[in-house]
Image (cartoon, coloured by chain):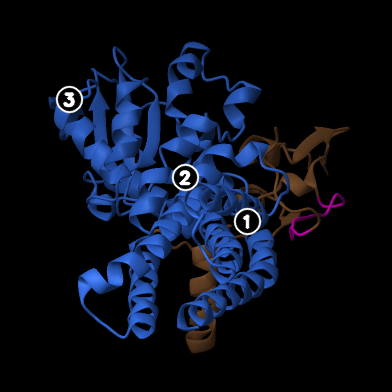
Chain colours: A brown, B blue
Amino acid sequence: MSLRYLKDVVTLQLDEERCSGCGMCTQVCVHGVFAVSKSIAHLVDRDACMECGACARNCPVEAVSVRSGVGCAYAVWKSWFRRKKEGGEVGSACS
Amino acid sequence: MGWREIGSGRVARVATDITLPDRLGGWGVRWGINRMHYTVAAGLYAVGQPGSQSPVLVSANYKLTFDQLRRELAGRDVWLLLLETFGINVWCAAGKGTFGTLELINRINRTGLPTLVAHRTLIVPQLGAPGIAAHEVKKATGFKVHYGPIRAEDLPEFLDRGMEVTPAMRRARFNLRDRLVLIPVEVVQAWKPTLIICLLIVVVCALAVRDFRFFSLLPVGLPPTVLYLVALLAGSVVTPILLPWIPGRAFSLKGAQVGLLSAILAALVMGSTWKVADLVALLFVVPAITAYFALNFTGCTTFTSLSGVEKEMRIALPVIILAFVVGVVVWTVGLLT
C-alpha cells in the first residue's frame, strides 16, 4: 500500500551551497523530503514533495525554492481560466 | 466558558468539552452545510487558568479546528491564539497566506501577548508552516516559532514530553478514516455535474422517443441515470476509500479502473436486454465520469503536488472528454436507430 503521486514532476530545488544546516526544512516538511547530514540539508525523497512551500518560506538563507501551490484539480481548473482573464496564480479552491 | 482576568482586562475562557451542538455543527460542515461560515472570533483565548509561563498555541478560527484543538486540552492551562483565517483550516489557510506571517505578527501585538507571557515561544501547528516564516516572526516580535505536531490529537503527548515532537507527529497521514470524513462533501459538491448529466439524459431520451412526458422518458432514461450514479459513487466514494490499493499513481487512472469494473458489474447485473451500442457506450462513459471524480479528489489529499496535478490534467482531461463524447454519441445513435 502506498500513497505516492507522480514521479519527476515537482519544482523543488535545494541549493546545498547556501544551506546553513539549521534543519528548519526537516521540521516543517510533512513528507520527510529533507534530511540533515554533515551540517547540510539533502533532498532524500524529492518525489514525495507536494509543493506546499513550507520549506522555502522557513529557510532563513533562501536555499530552498519551489513553485508552491495546491495540488487540487479544481484549483488548477479555475486557474487555467483565470489566467486567461487576469493572469492570476494557482490558489486554493476551498474559499 | 467564562473569563480569565488579566491585568489589562479579561480573556474569554473556553471549555474543553464538546457538546451536542458542536457535534451537530461539525457533522454539518462535513456534509457541506454552513461549511464556509463555520467560524469563531479570532483573538486570544484561555484554556484553564493560564499564567505568564503557560504555553501559547496558535491556530485558525475554523470552528471544526477549534473544537478538535480544545478537546485535546482538557485539564491544562494554555493560551490559544486564533488567527483570522475566515473559517478556513490551518493548512489550506497557510497555503493561501491568510494563516500567515503578517497576520501572526499583528495578532501578537493586538492581543497584548508580549505583556501577558514572560516566555517568548509560540507553538504553531506544523501545517501552518507554508504560511509562516518563523525567522521573520522572531525578527518582528521576538517570539520563537516552535512547530508543534500536525494533529491536535498528538498535543497531549507533545506537551507532556516538554514540547518535544516525535518523527511520527511530523508526518502527514491519509488513512482510511482521514479519507472517509472527506467523502460526503465530495458527493454533495457533485450536484453541478449531476444536474448537467441529468439534463443531457432527458434531452437525448426525449429526442429518441419524441415525447417529453415523464412516463414516456422513464424507461429509456432510468438506466443511464442509474449508471451515472454508479459512476459518481465509484469515483467519489469507492476510489477514495480504495485509493492506496488501486494500481497506478495518477488519480484519473485509478478512477478509470474502478469505473471500468463498475461498468462491467453494472452490465452483468442489469444489462441483459441492452443493445450492443448501450454496452459500448457504458464502457466509455462510466470510466470517463469516474476518472473525472477521482481527479477531483486530488485536492482532498495530503500528498498531491500542483505540478503533478497540472501534468495529470493536461494528459487525462482530453482523454476523459473524448471518451465521454464517444460514449454519448454511440448511445444516442443506438437510441435513434
Q: Is residue A68 magenta?
A: no
- The reply to whether residue B143 is in sight is no
Region rendered in magenta: A9-18
Residue depicted at 59% across the width and 59% down the height: B287
Neighbour tally class for label 3: few under 14, some 14-19, many 20 plus, Cα within 10 Å? few
Label 3, on which residue?
Answer: B19
Q: Position of residue B68 (x, y in %)?
A: 34, 30
Q: Which mark, by number, is residue B256?
A: 1
Label 2, on which residue?
Answer: B237
Main secondary structure of the magenta stretch: loop
Q: Check if mark 3 and mark 2 are on a common chain.
A: yes
Q: Chain of mark 3?
A: B
Q: Secondary structure at mark 3?
A: loop
Residue depicted at 21% across the width and 77% down the height: B213
- The reply to whether residue A54 is in sight is yes
Instruction: Look at the numbered discs 3 and 2 and tell me whether their residues touch, using CB distance below 8 Å.
Output: no
Neighbour tally class for label 1: few under 14, some 14-19, many 20 plus, Cα within 10 Å? many
Q: Position of residue A44 (x, y in %)?
A: 82, 40
Nearest the eye: B278 or A20: B278
Separation of marks 3 and 2 at Cα, in angstroms: 29 Å
Q: Where is the N terminus of chain B found, in terms of image quarters?
A: top left
Q: Check if mark 2 and mark 1 are on a common chain.
A: yes
Of labels 1 and 3, the one closer to you? 1
Q: Secondary structure at mark 1?
A: helix
**Which image quarter: residue B80?**
top left
Separation of marks 1 and 3 at Cα, in angstroms: 42 Å
Q: Chain of mark 2?
A: B
Number of marks drawn: 3
Amino acid at pointer 2: Val
